[in-house]
Image (cartoon, rainbow, N blue to C red):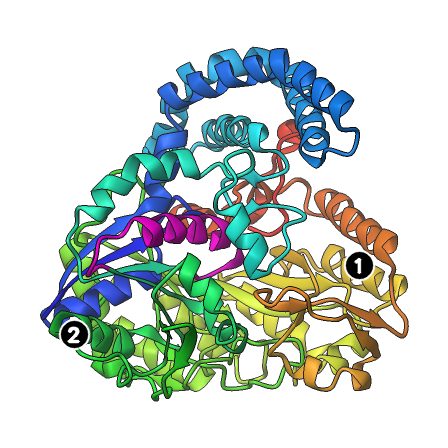
Amino acid sequence: MGKALLIFPPQWSPQHPHFALRALAGHLRHHGVEVAVRDLNIEYYDHVLSPHHLQRVRDRLHLDLEYLGPQSSFRLMLDPHSLDAHLDRVRLQAIKHFVDEHGEMLDRLPHMIMDAKETLKDPRRFYNPDMLLEALHVIDLALKATSTPYFPSQLSFNYFEQPGLMMNTNNLIAQAQDRKSNMFIPYYEQVLPELLASEADYVGISINCFSQLVPGLTLAHMLRQAAPEGMHIGIGGNFFTRVTEALSQRPEFFEAFAHSVCFGEGEDQLLALVQALHRGESLEKVPSLLYLEGDRVQMTMPRKALPMDQIGFQDLEGFPMDKYLSPEMILTIRASKGCYWGQCTFCDSFYGVDDDVKSLDRLVEEIRFLRDRYGIHHFQFIDESMRPSYMRKLAQRFIDEELNITWFCNGRIEKAFTPDLFEILYAAGLRMVLWGYETGSPRILELINKGVGYQQRFDILRASSEAGIFNFNYLFFGYPTETREEAKMTIDSLCQNTDIIHAYGRSVFTLNKQSPLYREAEKHGILEVIEDVEELSTTLSYKAVSGMDEAELKDALTSCTRQCLEAYHYGIWMYLRNRENIHLYLSKFGAEAVKNYRMERLASATVVDNP
């Protein structure tokens, strides 16, 4: 039936294995395919958060301080316009700043890092806020030290970014080979021989978000160039589904990175692809596939995704469970696909997704399998949004089956969420809802078409809070035509309702290529969409008829953090870094304890606004 090696590259949370790899491995194994998995994300974090690596980082930073300045100065004397020399100068400034600020800690990090990692794994220490925050601080500095030689690239606990990188094929090919700015190349050189020795028919790299793009494509490039004859290098994942048309015009992408790219939902086509490769058959009958044939990119016909009830259970065999930085594993799970509302103007979560709902029999069976086989008692439902009527049936079934799990999920604020429904959901283990709150401006709320009355939202959030459920609200700033005053309304709505808006995650509005707003740009005050020169970007730049400029937007973001720190009295959730940690604290201590625990003595500690 074939042999597959599935790889998940950095960067994602180092606390839990990603859903995509578990789901694909489980489905292929269900159909008899031999599957090996490599979670290179957690392996990379384990590598860089080690005494040996941090000792080498410390030595490199001191060597760069000694030699980088003279080298760049000499090159600038020879060529005043040398871009490399100017970049070295900027990098040197970043290194000097880091060493000046953290020099003493730099020497201590190799001796502290193992204890910090163990704190995140040990329940006795993890659930002690002081010990947890100290450990996170050590890990923050270790990751910043690791990143600084590659400035402006930045790896953190929650993200990887490379400011200024143009999202087009030629720049990404260059970046995949740039040893000066690409921190992943040295590590990949160590693991590449193991990956190539797998003798797999198919080696698949799952790239699901922007933070994985550079590390994922770097690995793809190295595998593509070194793969022996007969080894097929493929890319899949949610990210590339959004840029399929652009990829179909870029044969150079396939020559550099992969023999094929799967788009859409991957279980069905990946099984067909592995089987076709094993049998030596043409790829033209594999659905939803881009592949290079000669010098042209071929695109096969998409096929409707398999019903959720026909997809194999996710599987954890082969994952390094001892390496994940969490005392209790939280697994993502899916009960439905698509959004039953599907009318928000800014959203593109519908793209490439076939609406479907998993039967409760199948869902309960999968949860029981993961609970009994792997000891999983915490779950995050990654459904875009579940219908309240379905959630009522789901909750009652969880209670009847005595699953004894806790979970959290996304939610759409709407009137069907009644007080009695919240009571049932809490009894079924629901501890937190990630609500799409979006804005405190009635005008913006109407423009984004949330389909719920402005004041009505507060009644729903209050009912949720009274049932013991923690309300985490997503919001954004910078929607086209949003004024500074309207941004202030959003901040005020948070600060004035801390009793029912228990936490928030803020972001900046982006114009997604597949969103309804882009298709009706003029209607929403967008005067001009800037020429798209980044074919592999999922977003677009634009000019609006009115709204905040860049300085006003930055000020709104800063004001939000500053005012909410005071309004929430330095609540502990602001320091826990991500939703998974918040959920574990809620499951351990309850919503009231988490809401009321203050961290004033650590007011200078790092706060992450979008856990």
Q: Quadrant of residue 116?
A: top left
Secondary structure beneath disc 1?
A: helix
Q: Quadrant of residue 309?
A: bottom left
Residue at point 49%, 32% (across, down): 136
In the rendered structure, does residue 120 fall within the stretch colored magenta? no
Indicate the amino acid at tag 1. Asp
Vertical arrangement, residue 447 with respect to residue 467, above or below: below
Judged left or right of residue 566, residue 383 is left
- Alpha-carbon distance for marks 1 and 2? 57 Å
Secondary structure beneath disc 2?
A: helix
Q: Nearer the viewer, residue 263 or 20?
A: 263
**Looking at the rendering, in which quadrant would you find the N terminus?**
bottom left
Q: Which residue is mark 2?
A: 275
Main secondary structure along the magenta-highlighted residues: helix
Indicate the amino acid at tag 2. Gln
Q: Which residue is mark 1?
A: 492
